[in-house]
Amino acid sequence: MKKEIYVTQPYLPPLEEFIPYLQEIWENKILTNGGPFHNKLELALCEYLGVDQIALFANGTIALVTALQALRITGEVITTPYSFVATSHALLWNGIKPVFVDIDPNTLNLDPTKIEAAITPQTTAILPVHCYGHPCDVEAIQKIADIYNLKIIYDAAHAFGVQNMGDSLLRHGDLSVLSFHATKVFNTFEGGAIVCPDAKTKIRIDQLKNFGHAGEATVVAPGINGKMSEFNAALGLLQLKHIEKALSLRKEIDATYRRLLKDVKGIQCLETAGERVANYAYFPILVEPDYPISRDALYQKFKDVGIQPRRYFYPLISDFPMYRGLSSAHPDKLPIAVAASQKVLCLPIYPALEIAQVENIVRLLVDQ
């Protein structure tokens, strides 16, 4: 097979479309601190996503750190070991103890049936992840939170635009946190956001992301610098103009992978979202024991010819040094997550990936 470079790429609109935005930034000389593009993007995202309030951030990790502060979360938080490490790092930055719970074998999201056994008198919240953009069982998680008076913050980094039974998935829980990193479905190069349930909550979050300022001479909380710049916000406004086309292309790539892989022995595709509308953010496969070579051997085979799949998520968060000493991090308590991390491989999926390239990827996978 001819060596080609298939690396996950951000969607970039034509440069000539961005020039007027840059000219306006230069002309009005407002670069950050809630400028006009920032405010326009917040309103546009509320409308597109079907949410009431949204607060933009410099990146999703700072947004998650701030969301925990905004709800005054302390003590212990139940979360998943199967995610990007920023999910649990945000807890440590706030002095909170992560308590890991195993995942569902079909969705790879936090398993609601395992949550109650992990609740202690120190538990104050649940931090699930909509992994790969597939919705968590939000109804079951909410029932548990209501019984035990727990807050819910969803790490929705993968879930831009995802719906749940006809409504925005981002409306569930007390807060939802988005990432607009360059590799996400919708990106602002770097960026993030917190979806807020009401204006009062948004005011507090806006204060926290601006050093705690509640006015020029008033500081009400030990906040952080989490503001999104005008450059990033302008890019976001431009991205929104192209998002439907980008999602359509991702959907076509997803369907092509599924069609070509459906009869490949030893390769399992995760279930589709069904009634829950997907955004095709990732295309994970599970390399089962009856596939001719191991997951890691297949991973290296791809890399040798310039194809860059990702082992999302390997290692587990619970395997890293700052977490492995926790009692909840022991592999014996997380058998589903351990097995998934050893089998998962996310194949390239991005709007510019051509169907012929998808066919080449699958051909290499089938040719064993």
Image: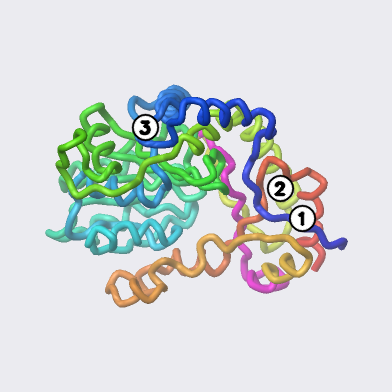
The earlier-in-sequence mark between 3 and 1 is 3
Q: Is residue 171 a member of the stretch shown in magenta?
A: no
What residue is shown with label 2? 257
Give the residue drawn at x 60%, y 25%: 20
Mark 2 closeness class: few <14, some 14–19, many ≥20 residues within 10 Å = many
The label shown at residue 362 is 1
Q: Position of residue 269 (x, y in %)?
A: 62, 53
Q: Hey, which quadrant is residue 365 in on the image?
A: bottom right
Residue with the most extreme left position: 121
Query: Among all residues in the image, which is located at the extreme right?
Result: 2
Residue 84 x %, y %: 45, 59
Task: Between residue 182 and residue 137, name the one nearer to us.
Answer: 182
- Mark 2 belongs to which amino acid? Tyr
Residue type of the residue flagged with mark 3: Gly
- Mark pair 3, 1: CA separation: 46 Å
Q: Looking at this view, is 149 or 64 the one in front? A: 64
Q: Which residues are magenta?
A: 277-297
Q: Is residue 285 magenta?
A: yes
For residue 197, say whether it is visible: yes
Q: Secondary structure at mark 3?
A: loop
338 vs 271, left or right, is left
Q: Which residue is denoted by mark 3 in the rendering?
A: 34
Q: Nearer the viewer, mark 2 or mark 3?
A: 3
Q: Is residue 167 visible?
A: no
